[in-house]
Image (cartoon, helix red, strand yellow):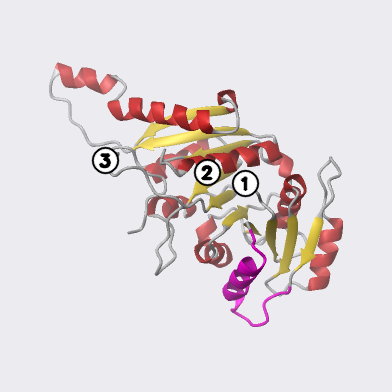
């Protein structure tokens, strides 16, 4: 999260996991925390919550501002959009409903609306108010030029949470039938797309602000959304940092892979608006985690 100066937390109730996470981020990033009451919550309740929120052990000062709630029922999106633009918000933090179990970010009306409507990055907190619980961060990457911005964002989060970072690249597997001994041998060898992906990922790591020892790199074959979801579940990922550099100008829907991931994972997710173009169309064998919707 480069130059995060203003963080907005949407607070639905006093016992807000999102507020605890947002306060931790604001303190460690030396950013201003904006808290906006939503869902019938009151300014007084949010003010009490701000006063009682736990600060980092470092004792860093929390600079906070209390934003006005939406004036009309159903006007949340427009109100938040306007506030984000007026206050130059870098990150919006929101949690899933407290009366439901773990749910994907696009499975609830509020988080879906926020992710699809805003141009800034969004952090969806999943019921966990303890920042120290985030120890394992996963960054799926398509190895495009703009992927470096997402990796840098994740490394900044890793330094704030003192967490490890896993980089995952999924290579789309092409159906293949081995008919000869040569074919069978080729199936057991590392493929050309994987060799190329390993070189590009190594280059990406070299350009990051952390040393290569700070990362674990992983390569999988198959459907990108399926493999990302499987990795999240099997490796007990605490935070998924997912790039979403392209959205449809008409529907504001995420890229097809990102959209499918956000409909199935239930861990905390940061959706990073990094901008930039995808890699060359000639790299079609490598699956993009953030494909465009065009």
Question: Could you tell me if the residues under marks 3 and 1 are in contact, i.e. CB atoms within 8 Å?
Answer: no
- Can the viewer see residue 237? no
Q: Which residues are magenta?
A: 68-89
**Crowding near pointer 1: few (<14 within 10 Å), some, many (20+)?**
some
Residue 192 position in % (x across, y down):
28, 26
Residue 5 position in % (x across, y down):
69, 54
The residue labelled by disc 1 is 2
Residue 75 part of the magenta segment: yes
The residue labelled by disc 3 is 282
Q: Earlier in the sequence, mark 3 or mark 2?
A: 2
Vertical placement of residue 40 versus 204, above or below: below
Vertical placement of residue 38 versus 139, above or below: below
Where disc 1 sits, the SS reads loop
Residue 266 position in % (x across, y down):
55, 50
Mark 3 and mark 2: Cα distance apart in space: 22 Å
At a point 65% along the width and 69% down the height, the residue shown is 86
Where disc 2 sits, the SS reads helix
The residue labelled by disc 2 is 149
Residue 202 position in % (x across, y down):
46, 27
Question: Could you tell me if the residues under marks 2 and 1 are in contact, i.e. CB atoms within 8 Å?
Answer: yes
Mark 3 and mark 1: Cα distance apart in space: 31 Å
Q: Depth check: 290 or 147 in front?
A: 147
Q: Depth check: 95 or 140 in front?
A: 140
């Amino acid at each position: 999260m480069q130059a995060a100066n203003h963080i907005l937390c949407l607070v639905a109730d006093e016992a807000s996991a999102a507020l605890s996470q947002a306060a931790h981020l604001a303190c460690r990033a030396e950013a201003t925390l904006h808290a906006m009451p939503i869902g019938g919550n009151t300014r007084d309740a949010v003010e009490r919550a701000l006063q009682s929120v736990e600060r980092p052990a470092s004792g860093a000062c929390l600079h906070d501002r209390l934003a006005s709630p939406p004036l009309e029922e159903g006007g949340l999106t427009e109100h938040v959009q306007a506030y984000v633009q007026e206050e130059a918000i870098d990150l919006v933090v929101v949690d899933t409903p407290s009366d439901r179990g773990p749910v994907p970010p696009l499975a609830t009306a509020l988080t879906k609306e926020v992710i699809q409507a805003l141009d800034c990055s969004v952090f969806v907190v999943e019921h966990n108010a303890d920042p120290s619980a985030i120890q394992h961060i996963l960054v799926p990457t398509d190895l495009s030029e703009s992927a470096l911005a997402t990796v840098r964002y994740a490394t900044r989060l890793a330094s704030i949470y003192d967490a490890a970072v896993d980089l995952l690249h999924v290579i789309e597997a092409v159906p293949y039938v081995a008919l000869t001994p040569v074919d069978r041998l080729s199936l057991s060898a590392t493929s050309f797309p994987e060799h190329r992906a390993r070189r590009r990922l190594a280059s990406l790591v070299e350009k990051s602000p952390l040393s290569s020892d700070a990362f674990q790199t992983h390569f999988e074959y198959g459907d990108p959304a399926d493999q990302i979801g499987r990795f999240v579940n099997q490796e007990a990922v605490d935070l998924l940092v997912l790039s979403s550099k392209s959205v449809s100008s008409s529907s504001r829907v995420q890229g097809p892979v990102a959209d499918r991931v956000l409909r199935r994972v239930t861990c905390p997710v940061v959706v990073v608006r990094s901008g930039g173009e995808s890699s060359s169309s000639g790299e079609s064998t490598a699956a993009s985690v953030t494909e465009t919707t065009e």
